[in-house]
């Protein structure tokens, strides 16, 4: 009869084979357990990072050529305006801003849902690195071929954007000021003011509060 024992240990070969298989199975189970533990730790770390509060962007977004990058996208806008009679009125609108000229310019398109009817308007902005200033022109959709007013010019400093222009309104010299403030990743505030005494005093006549849509 043929022997089934191992010549070295005397242990049956089939038992040696079973022991080897058992060791391999245990090793595979151990590796799977380690892999699962690593995966669970990774998922927990990712969840913790997702739940951690995100730092707010710098106030005003940025300065220089990136001053208006914060406004790129679509917004809902709440307007509060002052009529020539001195009465205030409110209405809603939307705004979409997109970059052009490799970021050195942008177009801001508005839809105004005024009490007297829907209207449109477009702001065109360009940045001049020589003066480190933005220039802003406004096109009123109710008179799209009307003469353009002189552009307001200025920049962002410490999170506040201020822009000025001198022009004529109703036959009188008027200085116009635009102000951007309270800028976050999801909101912003804009206002327009006029001065009839070369900037000594100002009368604000239009507010816009932006809330991001996308």
Image (cartoon, rainbow, N blue to C red):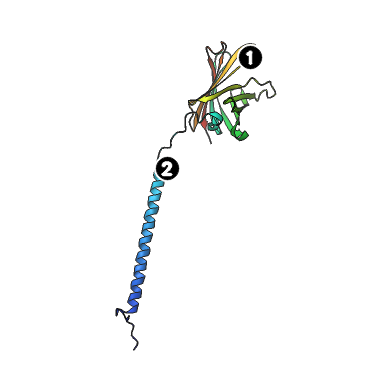
Q: If you read the primary sequence from the N terminus, does the residue marked by circle 2 or circle 1 appear first?
A: 2
Which one is nearer the viewer's eye here, 48 or 161?
A: 161
Name the element at disc 1.
Answer: strand
Would you identify the image quadrant in which residue 3 lies?
Answer: bottom left
| Name of the residue lying farthest toward the front | 130
**22 displayed left or right of 157:** left
Residue beneath the point at 34% across and 69% down: 22
| Name of the residue lying farthest toward the left | 10
Name the element at disc 2.
Answer: helix
Q: Classify 10 Å Cα crowding around label 2: few (below 14), some (14-19), many (20 and above).
A: few
Q: Which residue is mark 2?
A: 50
Task: Name the quadrant of the N terminus.
Answer: bottom left
Residue 65 percent location from the top left of the image: 56, 30
Residue 119 percent location from the top left of the image: 63, 26
| Name of the residue lying farthest toward the right | 145
Residue contact at pointers 2 and 1, CB within 8 angstroms? no
Report how far apart the C-alphas of labels 2 and 1 lie in the structure: 53 Å
Would you identify the image quadrant in which residue 54 lies?
Answer: top left
Indicate whether 34 appears above or below 74: below
Q: Which residue is mark 1?
A: 168
Residue 157 image label: none
Residue 214 percent location from the top left of the image: 53, 36
**110 displayed left or right of 2:** right
Residue 23 percent location from the top left of the image: 34, 68
Residue beneath the point at 60% across and 13% down: 174
Would you identify the image quadrant in which residue 26 lies?
Answer: bottom left
Q: How many marks?
A: 2
Q: Classify 10 Å Cα crowding around label 1: few (below 14), some (14-19), many (20 and above).
A: few
């Amino acid at each position: 009869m043929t022997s089934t024992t191992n010549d070295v240990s005397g242990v049956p070969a089939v038992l040696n084979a079973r022991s080897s298989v058992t060791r391999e199975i245990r090793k595979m189970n151990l590796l799977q357990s380690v892999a699962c533990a690593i995966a669970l730790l990774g998922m927990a770390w990712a969840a913790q990072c997702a739940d951690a509060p995100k730092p707010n962007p710098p106030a005003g977004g940025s300065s220089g050529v990136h001053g208006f990058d914060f406004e790129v996208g679509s917004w809902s806008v709440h307007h509060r305006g002052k009529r020539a009679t001195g009465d205030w009125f409110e209405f809603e609108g939307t705004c979409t801003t997109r970059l052009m000229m490799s970021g050195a310019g942008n177009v801001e398109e508005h839809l105004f849902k005024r009490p007297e009817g829907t209207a449109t308007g477009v702001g065109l902005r360009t940045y001049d690195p020589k003066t480190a200033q933005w220039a802003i022109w406004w096109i009123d959709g109710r008179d799209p071929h009307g003469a353009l007013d002189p552009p307001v010019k200025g920049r962002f400093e410490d999170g506040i954007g201020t822009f000025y222009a001198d022009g004529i309104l109703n036959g009188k010299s008027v200085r116009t000021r635009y102000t951007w403030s309270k800028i976050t990743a999801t909101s912003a505030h804009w206002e327009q003011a006029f001065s009839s005494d070369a900037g000594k005093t100002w009368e604000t006549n239009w507010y816009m509060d932006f809330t991001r849509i996308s």
